[in-house]
Image: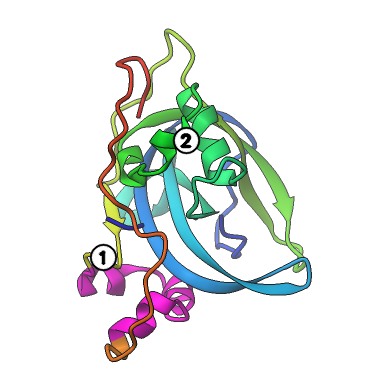
């Protein structure tokens, strides 16, 4: 299986800064795209992860009634010991990964799992304020997260689903269309190896660890 933070302006105010119980409900493998890093262009395999904040509800569309705020974060799909994804997940689960565990961790295990996330606000160059996940940890003892509201959503290139792809926002589809994985689908004669695909996890975890 294969499977994310956006600064795009929205038509509504971002969730207030603070710390919230959250639940992961969306996992999207963006693919291997070119990004600029410190003035250099490099290929990076990206995943976009989204959490809902079930205690923070707002009417975004009248026809849908109250819905939870959601926040997303993009990561390079890497479990290297210095990778941001690995550090983030270790903070979330409250336990480090061994190198053996990290060799084959299925990121889709995060779906429907709860956590505690802290959110801060930043301002874009255009002057728009947006929410950013600054940290993540396990829920404190005695604290619970409400049941999931949004249906779980997973998109992977390994199991490509055109309907799911079409349902994604245009700006995200445009980014994914620049990926090596997308190019393989529209030009199947290309034989580039897809890097960083999710695989079934061989990780064994303790009962008190969320994943």
Task: Count residues near mark 1 (Cα–Cα under 10 Å), then give few for <14, some for 14-19, many for 20+.
Answer: some
Say the numbered circle drawn on residue 158.
1
Q: Is residue 70 above or below residue 90?
A: below
Q: Is residue 210 above or below residue 122?
A: above
Q: Nearer the viewer, residue 161 or 86?
A: 86
Distance between the Cα atoms at labels 1 and 2?
A: 25 Å
**Quarter containing the N terminus:** bottom left
In the image, what residue occupies the spot 36% across and 79% down? 182
Q: Where in the figure is residue 153, as x and y percent of width and height?
A: 28, 53
In the image, what residue occupies the spot 28% across and 37% down? 202
Name the chief secondary structure element in magenta: helix
Q: Where in the figure is residue 30, as x and y percent of width and height?
A: 43, 66
Q: Where in the figure is residue 120, as x and y percent of width and height?
A: 67, 40
Q: Where in the figure is residue 78, as x and y percent of width and height?
A: 50, 51
Color theme of the render: rainbow
Residue 177 shown in magenta: yes
Q: Secondary structure at mark 2?
A: helix
Task: Count residues near mark 2 (Cα–Cα under 10 Å), then give few for <14, some for 14-19, many for 20+.
Answer: few
In the image, what residue occupies the spot 30% across and 61% down? 155
Tell me the magenta residue range: 160-185
Q: Nearer the viewer, residue 30 or 42?
A: 42
Quarter location, residue 191: bottom left
Q: Secondary structure at mark 1?
A: loop
Residue 179 shown in magenta: yes
What residue is shown with label 2?
99
Quarter location, residue 47: bottom left
Which badge, 1 or 2, comes first in the chain's sequence?
2
Residue 73 relative to residue 24: left or right: right
The number of callouts visible is 2
In this rendering, the label closer to the viewer, 1 or 2: 2
| Residue lying farthest to the front in this orientation | 100
């Amino acid at each position: 299986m294969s499977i994310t933070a956006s600064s795009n302006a929205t038509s509504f105010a971002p969730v207030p800064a603070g710390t919230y119980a959250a639940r992961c409900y969306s996992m999207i493998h963006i693919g291997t795209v070119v990004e600029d890093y410190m003035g250099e262009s490099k290929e990076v395999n990206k995943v976009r992860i989204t959490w809902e904040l079930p205690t923070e509800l707002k009417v975004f569309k009248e026809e849908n009634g109250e819905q939870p705020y959601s926040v997303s974060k993009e990561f390079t799909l890497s479990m290297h010991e210095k990778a941001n994804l690995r550090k983030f997940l270790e903070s979330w689960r409250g336990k480090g990964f061994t190198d053996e565990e990290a060799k084959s961790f299925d990121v889709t295990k995060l779906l429907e799992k709860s956590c505690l996330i802290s959110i801060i606000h930043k301002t874009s160059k255009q002057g728009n304020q947006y929410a950013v996940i600054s940290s993540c940890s396990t829920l404190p003892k005695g604290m619970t997260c409400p049941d999931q509201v949004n249906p779980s959503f997973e998109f992977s290139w390994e199991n490509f689903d055109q309907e799911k792809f079409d349902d994604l926002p245009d700006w995200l589809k445009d980014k994914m269309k620049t990926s090596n994985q997308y190019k393989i689908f529209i030009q199947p004669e290309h034989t580039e190896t897809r890097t960083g695909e999710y695989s079934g996890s061989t990780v064994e975890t303790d009962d008190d660890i969320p994943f």
